[in-house]
Image (tube, grey):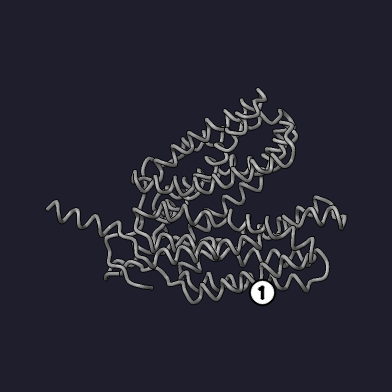
Amino acid sequence: MSNQAATTQMRTVRTPAKAWVMLGLGVAAQATGTLLVSTPAYLIPLLHSEQGMPLAQAGLLAAAPTFGMVLTLVLWGAAADRFGERWVIAGGLALTSLFAFAALAVDGYAWLAVVLVLGGAASASTNSASGRIVVGWFPRERRGLAMGIRQMSQPLGVAVAALTVPALASGYGLAAPFVLSGAAALVLTVLCAWGIRNPPRPSAPVGAAAPRTANPYTRDRFLLRIHVVSALLVFPQFTLSTFGLVWLTAGMGWNATAAGLLVAASQFVGALGRIVIGHLSDRVGTRVGVLRWVAIAGVIAMVALGAAGWAHWDIVAAAVFVIAATISVADNGLAFTSVAEAAGPRWAGRALGIQNTGQFLTASVVGPVVGALITAVGYPLAFALVAVTPLVSLGLLPSRDQHGIDESAERQPS
């Protein structure tokens, strides 16, 4: 009996080799979409200093792709639920490539903003669909680790944009970064159309179709609670990513180079932290349990950061900043995995789209709200007050995980 149980457990945790290939393609696809979305932000210095564009106008141009993403995340998720991940990702990347190249031909910044909105809307295809790939191909005991790796795609795309866009724009003009984005999306279109296979889905025994396709949002409030918790935990993340650099320079008196290096280091450590925390959730067997630990750590870290800034302890502030930035992004993979598992294979795409949309909408208010707070009370107290959002999230977290996917059902390729 024990030998049989051990054998069953080994089969449960075995990950198909093909799953890692799917994960790699999913990460590359989303990183490529992020490259286009991030490109306008790294054109701001050139647009402002050399072409005289006001910062407010340049900021609107940089926000255009993100606005497009918010409009289509749920729609792409629904398409992935209906048609599968392969052609949603490949088709979305093909459109991303088309709009990136279209940016070369438009005349005027207003039309460029329109094209960037469309490009961002197309690139959103990779967000929900790549999350479905992780949940579909990886067994439950490996999904936390896999989703943590998948969550590295966004910082990877941002890093590529940071390294390439300013140099290309300075050397070859504003069109050059869009050539890079379009070419990268075109290459990934071909690779994903060729290499991605839709994950196996549970078979549908007679009479079982209705429960599996039922709207999980009508079942209980689990998904809504995770969405709200994630929105609250976005506050510390975007507070630090938006105001961390200016706090170090204007508030702590650091030079721009040292501050930039610390912020870059925090992003790198944060990316690794997503993988570690995802693997931890696999080991302990709970997503919401680890998410609760992350929220508690977030409260402590933001209060500690405010205290270190108030005392003006440079070394302590630097260390706490890296820790706080790492904690602030640690929840993303956990929440995404929890949402996809609870939604089930027929609703995961839409649920992940709603999850992303809520986070983007919340992130959009962080800048003005926290900016006004900093103006009123200063950086240290503002950072400490942001700890209220992870504190509130603790009261909304469900007590246990929920699994909408029938892991015991026979799986068939879709």
**Which residue corresponds to the image point at 51% horizontal and 54% vertical from the top-left?**
151
Give residue 180's position: percent from left, percent from top.
68, 68
Q: Give the camera-side residue of 99 and 50.
A: 50
Give residue 331's position: percent from left, percent from top.
49, 45
**Which residue corresponds to the image point at 51% horizontal and 72% vertical from the top-left?**
192
Callout 1 secondary element: helix
Going by the image, does 13 lie left or right of 134? left
Going by the image, does 199 lie left or right of 349? left
Quadrant where the C terminus is found in the figure: bottom left
Q: Give the camera-side residue of 320 and 172.
A: 172
**Which residue corresponds to the image point at 68% horizontal and 43% vertical from the top-left?**
260
Give residue 324's position: percent from left, percent from top.
56, 37
Look at the picture and state if 306 lies above or below 58. Answer: above
Q: Give the camera-side residue of 74 and 138.
A: 138
Give residue 377's position: percent from left, percent from top.
71, 28
- Residue labelled with disc 1: 98
**Which residue corresponds to the image point at 55% horizontal and 54% vertical from the top-left?**
356
